Image (spheres, rainbow, N blue to C red):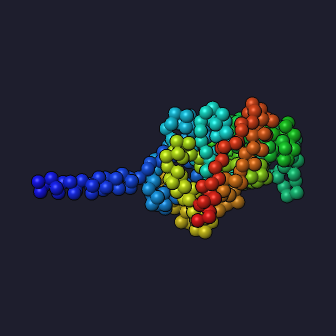
Amino acid sequence: MLLSRRAALAAPLVAASGRLALAQAPVTARIGVIPILAAAPVFIADREGWLKDSGLATRYTTFESGPNMIQALASGTIDVYVAGVAPLAVARTRGIDIKVVASTAVEEMTVVVTPKLARFFEPGVAPAEAFKRYRAATGSPARLATQPAGSVPNATLQHWLWEVTKTDRADAAIIAMGIDATQQAILVGAVEGGTVREPAVTIVTQRDPGIKVVALGGVMFPDQPGTVIAVTAAFLRDHSDKVQAIVNGAVRAVRLIGTDPARAAVHVEQALGKGIVDGATIGKALVSPSSKFTADPRRIIEATAALQRYQVKIGALDREAPLDGLFDTSFFLRATAS
């Protein structure tokens, strides 16, 4: 009788402790990411311990491009998407319910030219004239490497060439290749220029001081939409507090990059460098004119629509995908209010 009474008294305590342990168990976010500098706010928030403090564990899968990551979203193998915004609008038209809750960076892409072409970009010479003079001197158009048709780098390069600088199409040729291949082609002089983002901008200009940046992202396409943080509808429904933690962390991380880039660089080097890119290079890349970090998703809504319109114009998209419901700015607003 005594034992049964003790058991009866202990049962609620055991049940309560079990519920407490269950409540304290971390939620795992399966994060798909392209390993580029623009993803830095997520890596920083994670390695600073801010996500863990909020009861969130992370598991990363790396991808070469946003479109490749869409397949993972469709199959339900990732919960959080950290890559370019452009593929997400198209994904929603295919029944993939996902929300953009934060940005990480804008105006990521830049145009760099190799020494062979850079000598024509003299002070006071318009880019279109520089390309014209290059073709006149060599008999060939300048070859510019960028990612394949349909990508944001390709669209922004075309926008800069044909809309901003009004370059004659006979004076420049776009060569499609992968991100790493573009960097290597520029370094070895296999092309005369191309689009790169940080830390590649810092890497190539350090290795060859003759390589010159001739257009920053804002010149190529104002408020050029870049990397975003998006979450699936299922993860948002089941773990809205963890989504808020991710956005809070991104906001804090962007602030840390601005106030203490050396500290931020340590985390980014661990996530991206892996002995390939040193911390000093990462630190320079974080504060270079080619890097513009922002967690505010409102900044890219209009630019995303404008980019889509231009992609339709150049035939990269059949039609514009509706953006209604793609962006949820409430998490960012709560993060900044607190």
As rendered, which of 189 and 92 lies closer to the eye?
Answer: 92
Q: Position of residue 123 (x, y in %)?
A: 85, 58
| Image height of 99 relative to 20, above or below | above
Q: Position of residue 168 (x, y in %)?
A: 87, 40
Residue found 64% across the figure and 36% down from its top: 92
| Image height of 337 relative to 151, above or below | below
Determine whether, in the image, residue 160 is placed left or right of residue 196: right
Residue found 17% across the figure and 57% down from its top: 6
Residue found 64% across the figure and 49% down from its top: 328
* Quarter of the figure with the N terminus: bottom left
Residue found 85% across the figure and 37% down from its top: 169
Name the residue at the left extreme: 1
As rendered, which of 137 and 205 lies closer to the eye?
Answer: 205
Q: Can the viewer see residue 297 in this picture?
A: yes
- Count of marks placed on residues: 0
Q: Can the viewer see residue 110 in this picture?
A: no
* Quarter of the figure with the C terminus: bottom right
As rendered, which of 170 and 28 lies closer to the eye?
Answer: 28
Q: Position of residue 227 (x, y in %)?
A: 63, 49
Name the residue at the bottom extreme: 259
Q: Position of residue 137 (x, y in %)?
A: 85, 43
As rendered, which of 92 and 180 lies closer to the eye?
Answer: 92
Q: Quadrant of residue 80?
A: top right
